[in-house]
Image (cartoon, rainbow, N blue to C red):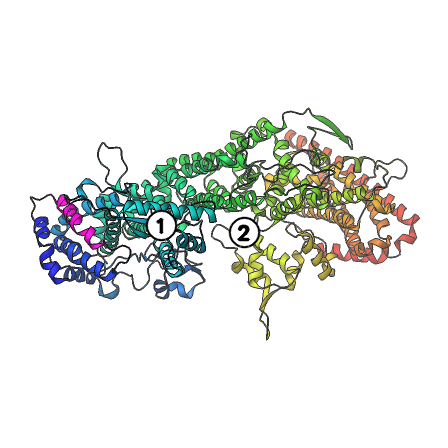
Amino acid sequence: SAGWRAGGSACFLLAWCDERFDFQATFLQCLAKHVPNIYSAEMDPLLEKQEEMVQAAILYPLERYLFGEDPETFLEKLQQSGTSQLCGKVFKGGETTYSCRDCAVDPTCVLCMDCFQNSIHKNHRYKMHSSTGGGFCDCGDTEAWKAGPVCTKHEPGASGSPKENSECQLNEEVMEHSRRVFPSVIKYIVDMLIWEEEKELPPELTISREKVDSYYCVLFNDEHHSYDHVIYSLQRALGCELSEAQLHTTAIDKEGRRAVKAGRYASCQEAKEEIKRHSENVSQRPLHVEVLHADVMAHQKFALRLGSWLNKLMSYSSDFRQIFCQICLKEETGSGKPCSISKLMLWDAKLHKGARKVLHELIFSSFFMEMEYKKHFAVEFVKYYKALQKEYISDDHDRVLSVTALSVQMFTVPTLARHLIEEQSVITTITETLLEVVPEYLDKNDKFNFQGYSQDKMNRVYAVIYDLRYVLISKPTVWTDRLRERFLEGFVSFLRILTCMQGMEEIKRQIGQHIEVDPDWEAAISIQMQLKNILLMFQEWCACDEELLLRAYKECHKAVMRCSTNSSRLREKTAFHLCGHTLESRPYRVSLDPVSIHLPLSRTLAGLHVRLSKTGSISRLHEFVSPEEFQVDLLVEYPLRCLVLVAQVAAEMWRRNGLSLISQVFYYQDVKCREEMYDKDIIMLQIGASLMDPNHFLLLILQRYELADAFRRIKPTKDQELIKQCNVLIEEMLQILIYVVGERYVPGVSNVTKEDVTMREIIHLLCIEPMAHSAITKSLPENENNETGLENVIDKVATFKKPGVSGHGVYELKDECLKDFNMFFYHYTKTQHSKVGSVRITLKALPPPPPPDFCPAFSNVVRLLNCDVMMHILRTILQRAVELETHLWTEAMIQMVLHLLSLGLLEEKQQLQKSPEEEVTFDFYHKASRMGSSALNAVNILMLLEKLKRIPQLEAQKDMINWILQMFDTVKRMREKSSLTTVAATSVSEATKGDESSQDKEKAERKRKAEAARLHRQKIMAQMSALQRNFIETHKLLYENTSEAQGKEDAIMEEER
């Protein structure tokens, strides 16, 4: 090689050094002379010899000119003078990476093994992952870590480098030479990688020698054909041995392409057609084969070698990186063409695997090591984002080999994400891309319908969804007007995607005949899973800023209204009467009409409403959405239909619709989806209950559950299946009413924290059985950082029991937490509910724990408990049990009625404890004590409960009934005590009033009137007490335990005092 260095390229070195020469022309002339000779034996290359010749003929003279001295000496000096604070290691596939759960800003922030072992994070909670390849070590990136951003190896001052860790500044001569060399090298690499001519080279690389008829038949890698397919096709087409075909196939898989035949153009063309024909016979798609001239092949191979050379050079100096980035970003003035780096990005999907790897590594070692140029690169990336994603979706290579996979390196940097939102409208760009890549899945109503979808294409579409998640992963701490506007613009664009999902893939109940083919349901549910955290992140971003939250709510409400009015405009309203109340609504039956489980718009609105309540901004909602526009009955309609569908599936009314519906209902309530599906539907019903008249709300519930007749009059029927269906529907409806009134563990619905919510979830899981850490984690929802919050609260509610000889350690619930157990916890599946009932029989008799108070925006929900229709529902069910109409009630129904009664009494008791009796308008006790409207045997709920105690089938509920009767008495005493105290206080104050002023007289008059009203109420309560005593006297046999129960009640009253 010394001979080559001394002789072969001395003339070129002299020419390069001479300022009068055109460097680019001389450089290309050198390449035109040497490259075809170096890479002439492509079929059987001697790699070491090729590398020696490249070094001697081209790279050594180039480096000598660039550095102005011996390359080895110069690079050694550079290496010793300091390194970058950023590690910048690019991960290979299968390499171990580490993420600190305590300090990482998000789960995409990772460290290589060396940096992790030399950092503070090895003593923290961390996760290990196996890299898919193409990732980047984040050591040294201050935006990636809350603490310990730099390991000891990359710390300023480490390894004897200067304290400031400033990399060695290149001298001006080297900088000047770099500015001459890099443009030519970069242009050559770009031109050769995007070169499309198979037979010809660019004119500047063509020397005057006669063109040789030497070609290669080149086979390219794809992800469609298997190893065996390729081996078979090569053997048949080329007539080669198995070992040779295997050698070719392995090289093609590793590098992305390989010459499989050399010769004249005609013979290579023939081989190409044969390979395509044989591969098409085996698979539906032929292999990608090209015939390339030997010189074209040689220059493309050397372009990649130059890319690797540049890549190595970038690691030595920040100056090299900056000059390289400046040249790559420079656009040809007035040409309107993209810059060099954008050209390569746009050509990425057409490059073979080996070329892509070199390009991506070069981007990592240059742009991503300089924050300023990383920003410029990100701007270029977003500028061509749509084109890049469309290319990727139509490509068949894995994501890790696509330039689109670099998005995570830019979008997860908080300052960069803000910049891209403000200046490049990146959220709008991503959402518009999503809509543009799936037009074939839109039906005539512009709703998604994924029947007959391609799984591979959907997986590629998910990559766009991930990008949205990356951009939103870090909430901004400071909002500028521009950021607010651009984010809102992106949110409105995102609402267009949700509009296409709202009501998608509607289903209709099969009657008579079973469905022939189960429809595809996985794609729609998968997209819902992918969007779950994105929906939550959008809501969290909106909640950061009051003005933004209100405007986002307005836009979301508008979108929901558009979808709702479009589909419900056709039918005229009908009236439904019950208990003296009338509801006018459009007729709709879940069992007959189309219904969809997908309602992301409605659920997003519910999430925003909760955040309005939590932040207190709800007081300004009327400024953005007028009460006339609000139409709460329409907002409630679709989530209610969804819950009714779940109830009817439980009642086996949809069994002819096959397994696809059962699977959808399962995921609707499963931990992976429920936060943005089932839970939000319950919240939307709570919003309805807080804003609608309670009687009208319950009439709507009865109507949609198709139970109007069941509570209006009893239709005699002997059809056992219909009776069973009706009973299951009543149970499901009662359960939903319990959830609407009692499920308050949502920040914004009541004043609870996320920790309170997680603690409650864990308590109810451990009530079923002791569980391992991993089992609890799987049963809890994850946030955007893939965390459940388990470790923060587990020690407060459980104790860890170490494993024995075999098995694993488990957490057991602390006894003091049993008081928080709720039999009707809304995240229990049917299996869990029955399991907890059988495992902890003692818990079944426990009354519900007092729920936290509703936030002011939801305080009216409790009115459901004491409204006329609720009393009618409770009384009707209890009366049927008392009259032993066995086919019209179940024990589960009675249990739920008792639970609702408990909630009503607990609510009234809590209100009486906090406020004077005259201010408490919640009168559950009065309503429940009132006689029913039945003329013959009018009874109130108290009387029905006394009768229930005698029914043998309800022996298990006896303790609960006794507790409720005691609570009735407790509340009654609290009412009476409050009234008496007020009357006594009034008498004393009146006696002391003698000569009061005219203003005092007016006040006194108002007080007198209020006291008269209170005395009247006291008189009514006394009459009711007399009636009860009379009833007890006439039914003494029913009250053998009365004195004992009375003693307990007195004891309870003493404790409460």
Q: CA distance from mark 2 to mark 1?
A: 56 Å
Can you tell which mark lies on residue 931? none
Amino acid beneath label 1: Leu
Label 2 secondary element? helix
Q: Which residue ends up furthest to the bottom in the rendered image? A: 805
Q: Nearer the viewer, residue 974 or 371?
A: 371
Q: Is residue 567 left or right of residue 946?
A: left
Query: Where is the C terminus found, in terms of image quarters?
Result: bottom right
Can you tell which mark lies on residue 219? 1
Horizontal and vertical percent position of residue 980: 76, 44
Q: What secondary structure is the magenta-colored segment mainly?
A: helix
Q: Is residue 741 left or right of residue 972?
A: left
Please tell me whether residue 23 belongs to the stretch shown in magenta.
yes
Q: Is residue 476 left or right of residue 535?
A: left
Decide: few, some or many residues near mark 1? Use Cα within 10 Å; few <14, some 14-19, many ≥20: many
Horizontal and vertical percent position of residue 294: 25, 49
Q: Is residue 989 above or below residue 368?
A: above
Horizontal and vertical percent position of residue 483: 39, 38
Please tell me whether residue 611 belongs to the stretch shown in magenta.
no
Amino acid beneath label 2: Lys
Label 1 secondary element? strand
Q: Is residue 481 left or right of residue 872?
A: left
Q: Which residues are magenta?
A: 18-43
Q: Would you say residue 633 is visible in this rendering? A: yes
Can you tell which mark lies on residue 754? 2
Q: Would you say residue 1057 is visible in this rendering? A: no
Q: What residue is shown at x 59% (from left), y 43% (from top)?
A: 521
Q: Nearer the viewer, residue 708 or 552?
A: 708
Q: Is residue 809 above or below residue 57?
A: below
Q: Nearer the viewer, residue 451 or 728?
A: 451
Q: Is residue 246 above or below residue 497?
A: below
**In the figure, residue 4 lies in which quadrant?**
bottom left
